């Protein structure tokens, strides 16, 4: 059993979270999901982590209306569970300065477009795919990047290009991307854990 501990933040469906949990269970990823945090008490993400008896926490504007105290709570929860790598998997909120400082270069995110295109504030979920289709793109993709202060900013670790079919619509594109995302995220996380990807190297 490895000592590498993952902390995952997810807001809604949690299909990426599930893929990561499964990959840890099967040994594809040599790590343990030591904690899941969601800002949405009713999220599928929390249902999935509770089902696996993973320590799971609801931390949100409801539990912590003061953003600073919320930042402290998330940071403390991650630290208390000895998290080595923070993974955003459909987490719809910005992280606070404390978490960003303590986990500098140790937080990653997945985004369903070829960043910097179709990223940033307000670009999430179906909104991304609708914009891609509206703009008549021929290719879209998935990006995994290190998390910095602004939405979808920070060095890009890896991208996959995905062709857009002639009759593609936002819904079909979303399904197609979602299926590819899981393996892509798992593979990249695995490479970070084994040291094949060095997050510090993106800052040299
Ligand atoms: C994914 O498309 C991911 O790229 C984006 O949010 C979505 C999360 O999906 N950041 P799920 O909650 O993991 O199913």
Image: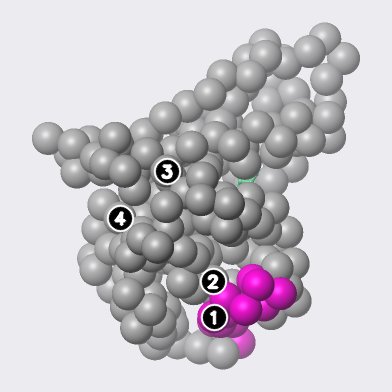
Q: Are marks 2 and 4 in contact (CB under 8 Å)?
A: no
Location of residue 95 in the rendering, given as x and y in whole percent from the top left corner: 41, 65
What's the mark number on residue 201?
none
- For the residue pair 164 and 61, the one nearer the viewer reads as 164
Cβ atoms under marks 3 and 4 closer than 8 Å: no
Indicate left or right for 75 with 152 as reference: left
Q: Which mark is residue 190?
A: 3
- Whether label 1 lies within 8 Å of ligand 1 gets the answer no
Residue 156 position, x and y percent, is 37, 34
Between discs 2 and 4, the one toward the N terminus: 2
**Label 1 belongs to which residue?**
55
Q: CA distance from mark 1 to mark 4?
A: 20 Å
Which mark sits nearer the N-terminus, 1 or 4? 1
61 is within the stretch colored magenta: yes
Q: Residue at 32% x, 74% y: name it.
A: 82
Q: Is residue 109 visible?
A: no
Residue 3 on the magenta segment: no
Q: CA distance from mark 3 to mark 4?
A: 14 Å
Disc 3 or 1, which lies upstream in sequence? 1
Q: Which residue is mark 2?
A: 36
């Amino acid at each position: 059993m490895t000592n590498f501990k993952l902390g995952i933040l997810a807001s809604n469906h949690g299909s990426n979270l599930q893929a990561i949990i499964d990959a840890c269970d099967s040994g594809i990823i040599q790590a343990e999901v030591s904690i899941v945090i969601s800002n949405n008490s009713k999220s599928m993400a929390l249902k999935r982590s509770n089902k696996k008896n993973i320590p799971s926490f609801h931390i949100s504007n409801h539990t912590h209306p003061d953003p600073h105290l919320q930042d402290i709570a998330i940071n403390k929860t991650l630290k208390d569970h000895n998290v080595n790598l923070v993974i955003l998997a459909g987490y719809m909120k910005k992280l606070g300065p404390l978490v960003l400082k303590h986990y500098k270069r140790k937080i990653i995110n997945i985004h369903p477009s070829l960043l910097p295109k179709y990223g940033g504030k307000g670009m999430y979920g179906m909104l991304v795919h609708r914009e891609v289709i509206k703009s008549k793109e021929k290719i879209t993709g998935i990006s995994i990047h290190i998390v910095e202060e602004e939405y979808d900013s920070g060095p890009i670790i890896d991208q996959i290009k995905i062709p857009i079919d002639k009759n593609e619509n936002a819904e079909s594109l979303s399904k197609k991307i979602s299926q590819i995302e899981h393996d892509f995220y798992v593979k990249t996380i695995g490479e970070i854990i084994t040291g094949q990807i060095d997050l510090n190297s993106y800052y040299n």
